[in-house]
């Protein structure tokens, strides 16, 4: 038996995460995301490849279940399209916080589709509601029996509220799909936690395959110094990020700093989306860091004292401020962070700080690759860039050390890397194979990888065989005690066969181990003994003459 993995998204890329794993005849779709820098159907995984691989005529027959790891759009954004347009009607699993955050994330993305006037691939608000009614919520470490053979379980992943790693098992074959995760705790979320499992395959993200980050305190201090310098000089700070995750982390950091500094300089959210997500953070305290869980009754850290809503009319207001604007990365295809960047980038007093990963092709990636003085948006539009650029690793993804630590801890037989850039994945593959001795793969989108799966053979043993094993064990222990007393440690530690038996496999019967003389009885045969007698060689006799 083998495990077949079809990578429909995030193969040598960061975007539209979607992996379909076939285990023992069961087919599980892990994540169903969109590519934020594409439009129309090209932003979705190529779902038709599932039908081609399975031979089924519809997706409900082809897929045993869909499991969503968290609420970020590159992991969930295509789900309404897959269910309501493509017609998948099977079970869908995600954690309670992910189900709570999903409607506003998907509705926000639907509005982007409308604004960009997609010609194909759109879904409606009603599609989102119908899709999410089909979702079955998961608790952490809750074992779900999807059918008589397939079992899944969720583990805490950090990264964002509700994020989970997913364990799936069919028979003896088992895999873990990590989604996005963080191996170190931050201000508002704990570190990823998972049991030590016996795995045939680990499918792990590799966003920061070659990056090792500084300590959290050092990164926070550097960030605050950059913001302090800018606003003290009368400048504006633009922080482009996604609404859930880093927004809460950095708001907590700045709100605390503003309180200590007793500043009245405004900190703004760009949209109600982040304010909505903050409401869920307040409600779902049990999914946050241990420090917050211990202290939230005295003070809920998501009740920000110095952060308020931003109106579009504020863009040209004079004076310093800090603005959190969605989406992250600054996409030239639209979004409020792009609008603000166009207005603020030409001023030397202003600052753009990029707290997380920026995909190739985004304006954020161009800014991180070197400070450009001019960015071409299209053939008719350009932006003069005179503002300060500050890059800081506040990403919720684990770094290369965290990835290697997780792989070493779980010790799977095989590793597949997804959600990363090809050159960095190639580097990490070499490390995994050379340092950990595990076969490692990083397939491109629409490529498949076949992994041999474990098949355990269950067997029984006769009472006589077990008794003989116990007798041999006792004799062996006594022998070792005598050798140790005589200080012959080398001989005492040599391996010794404890018992000999015969493996009997009969048609339509359970496999069992028995003793040699028991086999004669089972076969209904008489015992025969063969004796060898030494023969004198004729050459020996001739030599004696």
Image (cartoon, grey):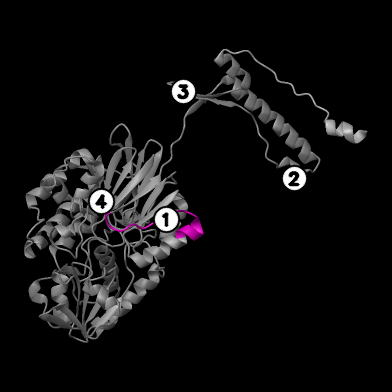
Which label was assigned to residue 510? 3
Residue 268 occupies quadrant: bottom left
Q: Which residue is mark 4?
A: 31
Q: Quadrant of the C terminus?
A: top right
Indicate the position of residue 420 as horizontal and vertical percent values. Answer: 32, 62
Q: Secondary structure at mark 1?
A: strand
Residue at point 33%, 34% (across, down) = 149
Which label was assigned to residue 128? none
Q: Which residue is mark 1?
A: 440
**Contact (Cβ within 8 Å) of mark 2 with mark 3:** no
Residue 92 appears left or right of 397: left
Q: Secondary structure at mark 3?
A: loop
Q: Nearer the viewer, mark 4 or mark 1?
A: 1
Question: What whole-number distance in Å separates the C-alpha atoms at marks 2 and 3?
Answer: 41 Å
Q: Earlier in the sequence, mark 4 or mark 2?
A: 4
Question: What whole-number distance in Å separates the C-alpha atoms at marks 4 and 1?
Answer: 21 Å
Q: Earlier in the sequence, mark 1 or mark 3?
A: 1
Question: What whole-number distance in Å separates the C-alpha atoms at marks 1 and 2?
Answer: 39 Å
Question: What whole-number distance in Å separates the C-alpha atoms at marks 3 and 4?
Answer: 40 Å
Indicate the position of residue 361 as horizontal and vertical percent values. Answer: 23, 71
Q: Secondary structure at mark 2?
A: helix
């Amino acid at each position: 038996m083998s495990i077949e993995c079809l990578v429909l998204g995030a193969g040598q890329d960061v975007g539209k995460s979607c992996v379909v794993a076939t285990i023992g005849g069961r087919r599980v779709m892990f994540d169903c995301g969109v590519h934020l820098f594409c439009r129309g159907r090209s932003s979705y995984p190529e779902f038709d490849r599932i039908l081609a691989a399975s031979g089924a005529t519809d997706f409900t027959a082809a897929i045993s279940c869909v499991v969503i790891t968290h609420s970020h759009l590159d992991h969930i954004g295509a789900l309404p399209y897959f269910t309501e347009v493509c017609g998948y009607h099977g079970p869908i699993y995600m954690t309670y916080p992910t189900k709570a955050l999903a409607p506003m994330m998907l509705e926000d993305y639907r509005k982007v589709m409308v604004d960009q006037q997609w010609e194909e691939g759109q879904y409606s608000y009603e599609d989102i509601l119908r899709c999410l009614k089909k979702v079955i919520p998961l608790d952490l470490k809750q074992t779900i029996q999807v059918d008589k053979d397939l079992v899944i379980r969720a583990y805490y992943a950090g990264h964002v509220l509700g994020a989970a790693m997913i364990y799936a098992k069919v028979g003896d074959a088992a895999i873990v799909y990590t989604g996005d995760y963080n191996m170190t705790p931050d201000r508002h979320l704990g570190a990823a936690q998972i049991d030590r499992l016996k795995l045939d395959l680990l499918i792990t993200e590799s966003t920061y395959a070659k990056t090792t980050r500084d300590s959290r305190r050092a990164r926070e201090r550097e960030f605050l110094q950059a913001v302090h310098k800018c606003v003290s000089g009368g400048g504006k700070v633009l922080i482009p990020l996604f609404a859930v995750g880093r927004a809460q982390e950095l708001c907590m950091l700045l709100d605390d700093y503003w309180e200590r500094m007793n500043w009245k300089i405004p900190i703004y959210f760009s949209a109600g989306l982040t304010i909505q997500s903050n409401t869920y953070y307040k409600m779902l305290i049990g999914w946050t860091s241990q420090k917050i869980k211990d202290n939230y009754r005295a003070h809920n850290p998501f009740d920000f004292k110095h952060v308020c809503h931003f109106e579009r009319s504020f863009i040209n207001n004079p004076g310093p401020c800090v603005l959190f604007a969605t989406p992250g990365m600054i996409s030239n295809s639209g979004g409020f962070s792009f609008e603000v960047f166009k207005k603020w980038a030409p001023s030397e007093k202003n600052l753009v700080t990029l707290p997380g990963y920026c995909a190739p092709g985004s304006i954020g990636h161009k800014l991180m690759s070197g400070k450009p003085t001019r960015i071409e948006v299209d053939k008719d539009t350009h932006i003069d860039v005179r503002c300060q650029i500050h890059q800081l690793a506040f990403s919720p993804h684990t770094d290369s050390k965290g990835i290697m630590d997780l792989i070493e801890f779980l010790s799977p037989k095989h590793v597949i890397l997804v959600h990363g850039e090809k050159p960095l994945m190639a580097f990490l593959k070499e490390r995994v194979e050379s340092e950990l001795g595990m076969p490692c793969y990083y397939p491109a989108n629409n490529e498949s990888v076949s992994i041999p799966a474990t098949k355990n053979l269950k067997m029984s043993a006769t009472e006589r065989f077990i008794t003989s094993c116990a007798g041999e064990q006792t004799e062996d222990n006594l022998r070792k005690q005598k050798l140790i007393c005589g200080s012959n440690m080398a001989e005492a530690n040599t391996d010794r066969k404890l018992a000999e038996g015969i493996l009997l496999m009969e048609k339509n019967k359970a496999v069992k181990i028995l003793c040699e003389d028991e086999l004669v009885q089972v076969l209904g045969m008489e015992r025969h003994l063969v004796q060898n007698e030494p023969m004198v060689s004729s050459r020996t006799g001739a030599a004696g003459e």
